[in-house]
Image (tube, grey):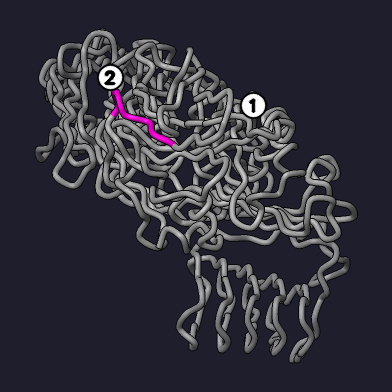
Amino acid sequence: MLIALLGCAPTLLDANPGGGEGPTGPELRLIGPSLGSYLPAGSTAVTGVAREIDAVALNGEPVTPSGGLVTTQRELDVGLNTFLLTGTDPDGVAQRDMLAVLAGTFAAPEGLVSDAIRVHLSTEGLAATGPLVADLLDPAELNAELAANNPVYDDPTTRVELGELTFAEPEIAIVPAAGYLRLSVGLPDFVLPIDATLKDALPFGIDLEIGADIESQVRLELEVWARPDEQGGVRTHVAVTEVALDDFDLDTGLLELIDWMFIDDDDLADMIEDSLGSELGPMIDAMIAETTTGLGDPVEADLLDQTAVIAPWVDAIDIDPGGVALTLAMALDIDGPAPPGDGHVHFRAPDPTTGGEVHVTVSDDFMNRALHELWASGGLDGDKELDPATLFLFGGTGSGRMRTRSALPPVWLERDGEARLQLGEIAVEVDTPGGQYGEHLELVMSLDARAELVFDGVVAGVALSRGEVVMRLAGASVGNEPLAAKLDQLQTAFGLAIGTMNEDLQAPLSDLLGEGVVLPALSFGRDPGHLGTTLDLTMAEVMAILEATDPTPPPPPNDVVVPGTATVLDDDAELSTDGDEGWICRRDDVVTTGDGGTWYVSEDASLRIEGSGHVVWAEDDAEIVLVGPGNTVYADPGARIDDREGSNTVILVDPLTLDTSAAPQPGCT
């Protein structure tokens, strides 16, 4: 399977066999460790053959062969380890051999990666969420709760009822405590109308109506508790600890009469406090539940033209006076053949850190899982036309093509304070028709490059720079002395031009999110423990990203403009053309058998659609008959929609009216 994945002839491995007698005469080759091995970090023996070879060096350090054999100990670092054995034959021709192995501990590419992502909201970040909570406090829901108490007083002579309350912009404070959040809600300029009816209080049996607005300042204190649930999501509980109506008093004007005769203002205040408390707690609980619903559900994402299924799982929720931390385990799978090898290099989870309003840490372990999935699925394979400069290096003229495939999975790690991407045993095949060094060239390459995550508002992905490249000849190119003489130059050129790979490692955001999506540019860093990538965001940036990536379409308008390009259709018109744009007047009937039209249907008008792909706006009492599939109707609730085909989309818009100010004149008038 490994040979098949390499996409090369078996001679790629023959160029670096794992032992056996070599030919007589000069010979330089590595024997061990075995090419493409997965080994523990630490000391390992490196062995090779160096027969009739001078100036033998391993990775630039001189070594002395004994009996034509090289044996030395080397330390394997975690990640990719490349060994380059060099020397000079009796004719003064430089010789080399190279192999790469992975070292470390390895994780199978299956199941969840624990502690993959950690999101920390600071006290400032929590404070910035206050307006979001305020926007979700709906007076209508509170009024429904209060209305359930009406009448608050009722006897044969008197009836007292509460009206609909109003309040100004809520004031929200969110303060983390040990294990929970303190949520303070203030409802300033709270106004509650109170209406009293004194039955038969006036001469001739006329009722006396007394009404006034009670003004108050409402304060509520709540505790929000959260923990992971059994499905990988979040379970919350909101407890109301205090509700207070400040300055609530009926002892003013005629309301004093209500206070004195019928209902004590303290009793009324208690009832209102109970109503607010019983409604606001569940309302905020439901709001949090709606926000976190589906947090553990798998989602599909497009990664470098591969469809990835990403499944988050809430591992932990930690709340302390410094903020809230949400820790996610992540599974990521891309369809493809079962990969060879022992999995990806495993790193422990980063220690918890904090930063800006929203501080995100992505573990290197999860990055390696994601890269392993891309590698195994072929998402990191290359197949591209050669640019003129690279073509020239390979001795080509006119045109050429290069294909690449790594035999080892990529490694993402930190070295010297920066992230690195390592790729080992990359099979490189170059087609250069009429080329100076041959028409088909084969090499093997190891790559270690600086890697940065890129998210500039236009593209997202990985940017490589400052590449360190090691090459050897392979397959049919073994023994190609003119090409061998160019290897040092090729290595240097590839290292300098490593950025040409970036187009294969990045994707336009328009491909991921659709045209017209604008996102803020983001800047990534490294965590202090050297085990993850960090990102600091403001809550405003988080909201911009959530709004831009929200798959929920905006609600349709209630007032739909009939454009001046619409055609006013005659009664009993029958159309068979595609892409029509029609305005159907009252009491007119129209039939279309074409596709892809846009229709504005007035009240009492009728439209029959036998094609597909139409968009219809239907006023109250309009009639739409859908015979064909794949149509979308936006309809006032009073419209009559007959979906005979059964698979069309009907969206109610309450109310829906047609704005004819820009419509053709005289139009339907």
Q: Residue at x 41, y 44 (%)?
A: 35
Q: Secondary structure at mark 1?
A: strand
Residue located beneath label 2 in the image:
324
Viewer-nearest of labels 1 and 2? Answer: 1
The amino acid type of the residue labelled 1 equals Ser
Q: Is residue 197 at all visible to an observer of this figure?
A: no
Q: Is residue 519 magenta?
A: no
Q: Residue at x 63, y 81 (%)?
A: 612
Q: Is 169 situated left or right of 276 in this image?
A: right
Q: Is 110 situated left or right of 100 in this image?
A: left
* Residue 591 placement (x, y as % from top left): 69, 89
Circles 1, 2 touching at the beta carbon (< 8 Å): no
Tell me how far mark 1 sits from mark 2, CA to CA: 36 Å
Residue located beneath label 1 in the image:
465
As rendered, which of 88 and 473 lies closer to the eye?
88
As rendered, which of 664 and 580 lies closer to the eye?
580
As rendered, which of 105 and 121 lies closer to the eye?
105
The amino acid type of the residue labelled 2 equals Val
* Residue 199 placement (x, y as % from top left): 20, 37
* Residue interval drawn in magenta: 41-48
* Residue 431 placement (x, y as % from top left): 74, 58
Kindly indicate the quadrant of the structure image that contains residue 389. top right
